[in-house]
Amino acid sequence: MVTTQLPDVSKKLAQLPPYLFVRLYALKEKAEAKGLKVIDLGQGNPDLPSPDNVVEALCKAVKEKTWTHRYPQTRGLKEFREAVAKWYDRRFGVELDPETEVLPLIGSKEGVAHLFMAYLNPGDTVLVPGPCYPVHYNGVVLAGGEVHWLPLKAENNFLPQLETVPEEVARRAKFLLLNYPNNPTGAVLENDALLKEALAFSERYGAIVVYDNPYSEIAFDGYVAPSYLQLAGAKERGIELHSLSKTYSMAGWRVAFAVGNADIIAALGKFKSFLDYGIPGFLQLAGAEALNGSQDYVRNTSRRYQARRNTLVGALKKHGWEVSSPRAAMYVWAKLPAPAAKLGSQRFAERLITEAGVVLAPGVGFGPHGEGYVRMALVGSEKSLEEAARRIGKFIKGLK
Ligand SMILES: Cc1ncc(COP(=O)(O)O)c(C=O)c1O
């Protein structure tokens, strides 16, 4: 019997290659099947257990507050929104109205993607610093928009040069994205100059500033990361996203939030209300406990990542690869040495998995401006980081 072919997926979806880690994990599984003990520094997937008080709050809520088993509302529980507002006040001195200026998200990845869908018409432009977290550009493509890259270069400390954006692009841009501490480069803001420039840019041209800030609490050597909303007038022109994924090692819980301009928050909330019901109630109550409770866990987490950073950077150096040491987030962003750069970051990463049993993220996975680099996540024990560095060093030497 002749059957008719099923329809193609949309052009928007077809033009995107498979998600970065989907490809790498297929190779990882193959290598493991062959008996290699693979060390995975690919994804920034926190491996520390979530805080005890939060786990307990979740269990208690699931058991005792059975109303949380019902559909939640997209706008979220008052308890969670108030906890977010208080945390922002304590941590950044930023005042938020929990009724109108806070929106829970099922992870900030979801928030970024849906924000673009809520605002972009076909062909609309978004200013995206690159390299970047993949949803910063994939989300634009899936929403039918167009990415205008702002290259992040080592010689500019991985900061975008807003003055180089052509006037006509600046006028049509609907969003300006920023993310510091930065994934994947690990760059941080030393002062508020870029934030001020972004605000002035938004006031002049109209683009909404989206400050993606999931790494603000993972900082080393005394560095304290800012919030975009600390700037006077910032709330008029944008929103900030924050996540419990890294701060409290709760990546699997999918708890995050958007804060800032009430109109933008309302538009995102309206869009989401057609698609999801927000975060399950018991997770919001546990999230509120994370934000309201003792923050010792957060301080310890930064210390742990800092020790891992020292170990990995030191071990890579010992094995012949001098890389710069990040002051925040949970990644080492390293320029490939000549013989490895010739392969290209994707091929390098693929061969490294198959031949040395180490997964890292190829720079090109973070957009075209990431080529020539790789990203190593500070996950796993210090012993395994040392072993990964040994294997990487040996693999690179073998290329010469
Ligand atoms: C810059 C950036 N934004 C957002 C996210 C997503 O975080 P969430 O777990 O809240 O979706 C990540 C995760 O790695 C990230 O690096």
Image (cartoon, grey):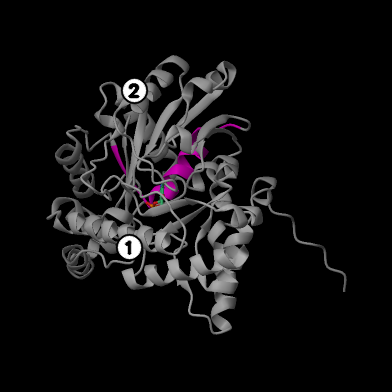
Residue 268, position as x, y percentages in the image: 41, 38
For the point 33% across and 25% down, the residue is 193
**Type of the residue with mark 1:** Thr
For the point 38% across and 72% down, the residue is 384
Residue 381 can be seen in this image:
no
Nearer to the camera, 360 or 68:
360
Q: Is residue 377 left or right of residue 355?
A: left
The residue range painted magenta reads: 102-121
Disc 2 target residue: 196
Disc 1 target residue: 311
Mark 1 crowd level (few <14, some 14–19, many ≥20, 10 Å Cα): many
Residue 128 can be seen in this image:
yes
Q: Is residue 110 magenta?
A: yes
Ligand 1 within 8 angstroms of badge 1 C-beta: no
Residue 300, position as x, y percentages in the image: 19, 59
Q: Is residue 176 above or below residue 200?
A: below
Nearer to the camera, 163 or 51:
163
Q: Earlier in the sequence, mark 2 or mark 1?
A: 2
For the point 56% across and 52% down, the residue is 365
Quarter holding the N terminus? bottom right
Nearer to the camera, 193 or 323:
323
Say what secondary structure mark 2 lies in: helix
Ligand 1 within 8 angstroms of badge 2 C-beta: no
